[in-house]
Image (cartoon, rainbow, N blue to C red):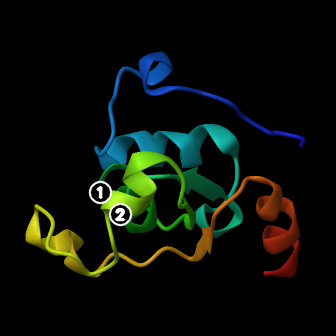
């Protein structure tokens, strides 16, 4: 699958869930936040801060975090209790199908 930009938190010296990571992504990409799909398996570390930055969020429900955390489950901080991803998938192969449908 083609990729416009690949970076890590180490590249930018900022770690998740700091929203600054996602703001840097927006800045470097040259795209509007709603044009960027961010895929993550954790509601607290991935989906919540990416959504706060305005990104289209994709929650991939795989691995332990994809099943330990549930939407609206009590998590800390309390603000994460109502985290909703833009899209929920179970396999990466679903990504190209669903993104093209949005």
The residue at the point 44 percent across, 57 percent down is 66
Query: Callout 2: few (<14), some (14-19), or many (20+) C-alpha neighbours within 10 Å?
Result: many
> Is label 2 in a helix, a strand or a loop?
helix
The residue at the point 87 percent across, 69 percent down is 97
Q: Is residue 61 left or right of residue 74?
A: right
Res 90 quadrant in image: bottom right
Q: CA distance from mark 1 to mark 2?
A: 6 Å
46, above or below 29, in the image: below
Depth order, front residue of 33/17: 17
Depth order, front residue of 91/95: 91
Depth order, front residue of 12/101: 101
Where is residue 51 drawn, in percent x and y?
44, 67
Q: What number is the disc on residue 48?
A: 2
The residue at the point 37 percent across, 66 percent down is 52
Labels 1, 2: front one: 1
> Is label 1 in a helix, a strand or a loop?
helix
The residue at the point 53 percent across, 61 percent down is 61
Q: What number is the disc on residue 53?
A: none
98, above or below 95, in the image: below
Can you say which quadrant of the picture contains the N terminus? top right
Where is residue 76 drawn, in percent x and y?
11, 61
Query: Callout 1: few (<14), some (14-19), or many (20+) C-alpha neighbours within 10 Å?
Result: many
Where is residue 11 drawn, in percent x and y?
49, 18
Q: Is residue 45 left or right of residue 1?
A: left
Where is residue 26 drawn, in percent x and y?
57, 49
CB-based contact (under 8 Å), mark 1 and mark 2: yes
Q: In the rendered image, which residue does mark 1 sit on?
A: 44
Q: Is residue 98 left or right of residue 47?
A: right
């Amino acid at each position: 699958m083609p990729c416009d930009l690949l970076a890590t938190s180490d590249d930018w010296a900022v770690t998740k869930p700091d929203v600054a990571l996602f703001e840097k992504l927006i800045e470097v990409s040259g795209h509007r936040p709603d044009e960027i799909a961010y895929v993550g398996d954790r509601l607290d570390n991935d989906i919540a801060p990416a959504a706060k930055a305005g990104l289209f969020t994709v929650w991939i429900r795989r691995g332990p975090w994809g099943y330990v955390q549930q939407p609206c489950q009590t998590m800390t901080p309390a603000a994460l209790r109502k985290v909703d991803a833009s899209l929920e998938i179970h396999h990466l192969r679903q990504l190209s199908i669903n993104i093209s449908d949005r």
